[in-house]
Amino acid sequence: MLAAFIIVTLVLMILCFNSTRMTLFVVITVGFIQDPIRKLVPDEPVFFVVLVGVFFAAGMVGAILRNGARYFVPLSGLNRLLFLPLILFLLVLLIQTLATILRYDEVVLAIAGVNGYLAPLLAFPLAYFYVNGIDDIKRLLAVYIGFNIIVAASVYISFFGVDWKILQQVGKGLVIYDLGVVLTAHSGFLRSPEITAWHLAASVCMLWTISIFTNRPAHRLWFAALLVVFVGAIFLTGRRKMLLEIVVFFSLYFSLVVFTQTSGRRIFVGTTMLALGLSLWLGLQQIFPDKYEGQLDLYLQRGATVFEDAPERFSLLGLGSAQSALRRTGWMGAGMGLGSQGARFFTDKSVTARVGGSTEGGLGKLIVELGVPGVLIMFWLTWRLSKLIFAILRYCGHIDRTAAHIGVAITAFLGANVLTFIIASQVYGDLYILLLLGIMVGFVLALPRVFSCEGGYSEVKSDNKKNLYPVQ
């Protein structure tokens, strides 16, 4: 079995090394199958959490060798808009990585921590060079949604009482004590309910993104049914914050539609899907078997409390985590990796105990690992990237409505994840999720390239000035 696994891994690495397109499809596939495989292997080795990174690295190295310095062009942005803040941010990462190594003699911990920041950045160019047309984005998102249909089905199977090992959580698992009862947090094939809920919420957003490609009422009905399936499965994971992420996504999406002057037809199609989905949900509520009715109601009641609890969570886990991090580590931070998910696997408790629970919120994690100066530089980089993305969205809004819709939907998804990160950072320690977020940014950056003249440049208007967005 081990020999077969090594052979398959080497073959896939070779394929990824030679093909950017193959790399992205392998990353999407391995990201889902690595958790079920881990559950079936004795002792559930933590290596499988980063297995997807092996294939991504192989594809990235191959792409760099084929393209040379051109591979990093998307990272510089519009007229090198991102260049200076990116260089300063990389310098911060280097300093904090050295701080962890010199203070605690923890090389592996430092490397694991810095990878969490580099992975999405390095995924930008890979996705950028993958896209040669809108259909390329559609195919990859369709594959991602297809895997999540299987994940959602596994959550429902677990809820119905099937107790296979492959459906159980990795490790001790999460048990929810709420509403005066004990609720099982169903994770399905993936390793934890948190990871499962994130992917299901992402699938709702991606399903909305590709909805523009359907003109048939029957297809819209299927999409609406899938929305119901995904949202229902999120309730069963018990991870309420992902329901909030979906609401934020739709709020940002409709706001950006107005911003980019995207066609109103997109809103009509989407609204139709939502209406159909709500109708199906209410219908299922009436025909659901009596033996599960009581249990399902408990999950629905818990999920509904996310909106009333949101201000408190933002205060305690958002701003509160930042205050806690400042008290524990000071303005200069504690070092790279100390706030990362799974830090306990790479060091002893005496090191991670210094930060306590201050890294549960995203702002606290950033202060612990980057320090306040590093956080300010990261905010600057994010602001510059946002300006670039908005310039691209406006450009696409005047050139191609389909591209504008895709860009708006992906941007809304990224924005919703920023809010989720602030109140719950741990899920963003997952390498696969970080790579996916980087890939989504790369898709948006590639949109002007898709509609440019071959070998030329695309004109993108930003701040009422004409700039050139490089595509070669």
Image (cartoon, helix red, strand yellow):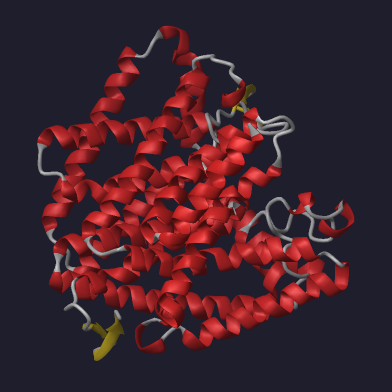
Q: Residue pushed farthest bottom?
A: 465
In the picture as drawn, the residue positioned furthest to the right comes out as 350
Residue found 34% across the figure and 43% down from its top:
143
Task: Place residue 337 in its image quadrant.
Answer: bottom right
- Say if residue 169 shows up in the picture: no
Q: Considering depth in this image, is 324 or 155 the residue closer to the camera?
A: 155
In the rendered image, residue 256, in percent from the top left (x then y), is placed at: 27, 64
Position above or below: 411 against 227? below
Judge from the rendering whether residue 131 lies leftward or rightward of residue 24; answer left or right.
left
The tally of labels here is 0
Q: Residue at x 31, y 15 (%)?
A: 286
Q: Check the image and report above or below for 270 versus 276.
A: below
- Residue 334 is situated, as x and y percent measured from the top left of the image, at 78, 70
Residue 444 rendering spot, x and y as whole percentages = 33, 66
Q: Nearer the viewer, residue 18 or 71?
A: 18
Residue 71 in percent (x, y) is at 43, 76
Q: In percent of the image, x 71 and y 39: which residue is there? A: 45
Residue 345 visible somewhere in the drawing:
yes
The C terminus - image quarter: bottom left
- Relative placement, left or right, of 42 versus 222 is right
Q: Up-down: is 40 above or below 227? A: above
Q: Residue at x 79, y 60 (%)?
A: 355
